[in-house]
Structures are given as structure tokens and as C-alpha cells.
Image (cartoon, grey):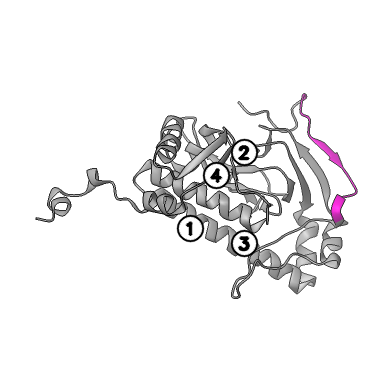
Amino acid sequence: MPRRKNAPDSSTNRSHGPPGGGPSIIAPALWTSGAGYPLNAEERALLAVIATVVRFRKGETIYEAGDHADAVFNIITGVVKSYRDLPDEKQHIVGFLFPDDLVGLAESGKYVNSAEAVTAVTLYRIPTRVLEPRLRRNPNLDFQVIAKLCHELREAQRHAFLLSKQRAVARMGLFIQMLETYQDGQEQVTQEVYLPMTRSDIGAYVGISPEAVSRSFRDLVSRGAITFRDRRHLKIIDRAQLEAVIAEIDTTTVPRRQRTGD
């Protein structure tokens, strides 16, 4: 079980004086091509004076669904998962969040989902009671946050499309593409796709069992679409084959007449 926030043995470390000039919110452009625009130095400074740096160990809970939403978090380093607990004590992961993402969006003053550190993470904690007045006084900063929210909506749509795929291997192909797209957006100089999350977390995100995750990875390797350097790093070696796997139809769900062309 993940360690609870604020537990006696919690390693959460809070310190003032945010590094790097303050929070960075980079959202893709809405109506133009390109990677979007980061906050400028003045806008980052406006947030820096109200932000606190917080750190969580891998597996620590950042907040729980239903908690009072008194802050939003901007990821500096590490990966966070946003999830909901299911009645059978399993998790439904609704998203993985990376550096420059916002964590902690809420509804009616309460967090909608829970958030947990997938890796050790460092974040800016920005109190909502002082953030909102600054957004109202700074239209460009307000727009950047709106653009980021639109990005989160697009990610939710991609997740829904992934879950619509019937074949586990097709879901995994789309998941790999999503991680690669994130890395490309961050301009990470690497030909590999990094998998910081466990097989269980991947399964909870794509809607299959951890065993099916491993089988799907082996299937993609056997088809020559990807190769693994180790458990955390893979490389796409045949993009056309990966696309073909994603586009496949599970023939077990297609009526016989449609399959045979009768």
C-alpha cells in the first residue's frame, strides 16, 4: 500500500525559495502549429512568490479524492499518477503526469481524483486562494492555464480512444505512442521510450491485467515492432508494424459473415 501523506515516517520535504525561476506551465498551442509557449520570466516570478517546493517519495500520496482542494501542483521532476479507487480495491488510473504538468484540478472545491508519486517527485505547491486573484489580474497567465486545461482534455480524449481498442496489444501500442509523444514534446534527446511506471500501473491505465501487459510487450517484440534494452527502456524499431498492430481488428468479436465476406 502507498504511504499516506503526512504520516509520521513521511519523507515529504517542504522548502521555500523555488528553484529555476518559479513554476513552468507549458501547454501546446491551441490554434497554431508548434509546441506552445512557456511562461515568461515575469509570469513565473508572479507564481514563484506564492509557491512552495514539496517533495514526495515514490509511492507517497500527494492528495486523495474528496480532499479540500487548497492547492494545485506544478511538477518539476518525476512522474505522478492521477487515479480513482474502485470498489474491488483496485485502481483506475486516469492519467500519468510529467514535468511542467499541473496536478490538482478540482470540482466544487474538492479534488476529483487522487494523486500519487510514481517516482520520487519534486513539485511546486501553489495555494489556490492566492493563485486565483493573480490569474484574474494577468490575462496571459490565465490563458496559459486555460490552454493547459485544454491539453488535459485532449489527453483524456486520447485515453478514451485507447480504452475503445478491444485488443490488449493495440492498447499497448497506443500507450507507447503516447509516451513517445510526451518525450518528443519535452525535446528529450533519446531514441528510447522510458517506462517509469510499473506493469500494474500500466495495466490500470490501459484497462488490462499486468500479465496482459507483459504478454503484449512480448507480442510487440516478436512482431519486430519494438525492442527492450531493459525493463524500463524500449525502442520502436518498426513504426509501420506498430501502426499495423494498433489498427488490427479483433476478429473474435466480428460476425462470421463479415469475417468471411459472405
**Crowd class of label 3 (few under 14; some 14 to 19; many from 20; radius 10 Å):** some
First along the sequence among labels 1 and 2? 1
**Element carrying mark 4:** strand
On the image, the x and y values in percent for residue 126 come to: 78, 52
Q: Which residue is mark 1?
A: 157
Residue range (magenta):
8-20
Quarter of the image where the N terminus is located: top right
Q: Which residue is mark 2?
A: 196
* Distance (Cα) linking label 4 and label 1: 25 Å
Single out the mark in the foreground, 3 or 4: 4
Using the numbered discs, state the Cα–Cα distance from disc 1 to disc 2 in whole angstroms: 22 Å
Give, as a three-letter code, the residue at label 3.
Leu
- Is tag 4's residue or tag 1's residue first in the polypeptide sequence? 1
Q: Which residue occupies 34% across, 46% down?
A: 166
Give the labeled residue for mark 3: 149
Position above or below: 148 against 243: below
Label 2 SS? loop
- What is the secondary structure assignment of the residue under circle 3? helix
Give the residue at x 41% y 33%: 215
Q: Quadrant of residue 29?
A: bottom right
Is residue 120 visible in the rendered image? The answer is yes
Q: Earlier in the sequence, mark 3 or mark 4?
A: 3
Q: State the image coordinates of residue 51 (x, y, percent, origin top left).
A: 83, 52
Cα separation between marks 4 and 2 = 14 Å
Between circles 3 and 2, the one closer to the viewer is 2
Mark with earlier residue (3, 1): 3
